[in-house]
Image: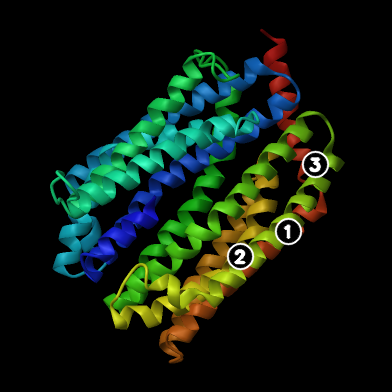
Amino acid sequence: MRTVDILVTGMFSPAAVAAIGLADIYTGILRRVGGSLGTAAIAIASQDTGRGASTSRDDAISQALIIGAVTGVPFVILGLLFGHQAIAVLGADAEVVRLGGLYLMIIFLVAPMRIVGTVATYALQGTGDTRTPMLISGVANLLNIIATVGLGLGIGLLPRMGILGVGLATAGSRVFVALAILGALYTTHTDPELTRPADIILTRQLLGISLPRFAELMVTTLVAFPFNALLLTFGTEVNAAYHIGRRITQQIAAPLYRTFSSVSSIVVGQLLGEGKPSEAQNAGYVIAIFGLGTVGVISLGVMIYAPRLVTLFTNDEATIGYAVAFTRTYAIVSVAMLILFVFAGGLRSAGDTRTPLYARFTGHIGLMLGFSYLSGVLFGFGLLGVYTGIVLAYIWAAIVVALKFISGNWTETAAALIEARKNVVDSK
């Protein structure tokens, strides 16, 4: 979906690509909020599905959706009042500020719906229903692509609205996802049901699991601000190239390692709910091995065909060269991301969101930002130092999370959470 945004805006100018990329730093906060609450929802939903506790599961899902809607309201206000200032503070030029501020304002206007849609998707996946979110997201992405091309470029009878049209298409698709999934939960189409929240223990568990996850995700967001500022010192073309290279690998490899992460959370969580910790750990190993074989082959293909892939996004000669290098860098990163996502997904399904937080924090602060700045700027290695810092950050994070998963002591966290929820159900 966002890849099409970059493709279309690439037809406008490098400034438009940079504007979308910089605005995406802020809109990424919405994904962080939804992802953190969704992580808690999928952990509890998978565990309770495994042990057949539908009452506790439905209560937790309903609470997560309400919390998500409430947390989206401040973003609406921020978008209306400070959209352009948010882009300007990153050091962008006037045209990038104008375009990025407009796009950011539109996306933030639908923040509550976007967060609710993300949480509901995770919750349904936790129950083992990956088909319903897939169908809804598929329709939403198709509508978004059609609207982005139509409104952005003015195809047929539609007006040419430029970046405004791109923003409206994205916002509309997120509203569609939220309404469609809520409708599925409200009807008998899905197993979970929306209920009136009743148990404070579930609230505490949702927050206890989601807050470290939110901190982990926000580390990547907060580091993105100085990291993009660092890239802008090398020029607007370099910044645009970074977003193009990152977008290519996210389009091709990211759906796979995110899928394997979801599978890990679902399968490991349900086995933990069934009281089978050893089988849960073995399942994580199998998923990781299968994922490495798949993502490894695809990443190799991305490295080989990077020059061709880049030209789909831009025809600016200065940008193309840098974009090829960033694309190959993130192709290498994708292999480390697979390991990180699979084992982190297993840990989170047990309720351990602190280990992935530590892994991301140390990797992004110390290596992606710190190493890149020291080697790239102070020691004069330029973009080579930046490429190396990116790769090292994800390799380090993958090692930390893998070692924790191998230790096996994370299963005790799941056992404690399940025991507390058993008391809640028994008291009803």
Q: At label 1, which amino acid type do we have?
A: Ala
Q: Using a 10 Å C-alpha cutoff, classify the residue at mark 2 as few (fewer than 14 neighbours), some (14 to 19) or many (20 or more).
A: some
Q: In the figure, 396 relative to 359: above or below?
A: below
Q: Residue at x 32, y 61 (%)?
A: 7
Q: Position of residue 43 (x, y in %)?
A: 64, 35
Mark 2 or mark 1: whose residue is earlier in sequence: 2
| Residue 280: mark | 3
Asked where in the image residue 367 lies, by quadrant, the reply is: bottom right
Q: Position of residue 217 (x, y in %)?
A: 50, 52
| Residue 298: mark | 2
Q: Are marks 2 and 1 in contact (CB under 8 Å)?
A: no
Q: Are marks 2 and 3 in contact (CB under 8 Å)?
A: no
Q: Residue at x 78, y 34 (%)?
A: 271
Distance from the alpha carbon under mark 2 to that under mark 1: 22 Å
Q: What residue is disc 1 on? A: 402
Mark 3 or mark 1: whose residue is earlier in sequence: 3
The C terminus, quarter of image:
top right
Q: Residue at x 18, y 62 (%)?
A: 97
Q: At label 2, which amino acid type do we have?
A: Ile
Q: Using a 10 Å C-alpha cutoff, classify the residue at mark 3 as few (fewer than 14 neighbours), some (14 to 19) or many (20 or more).
A: many
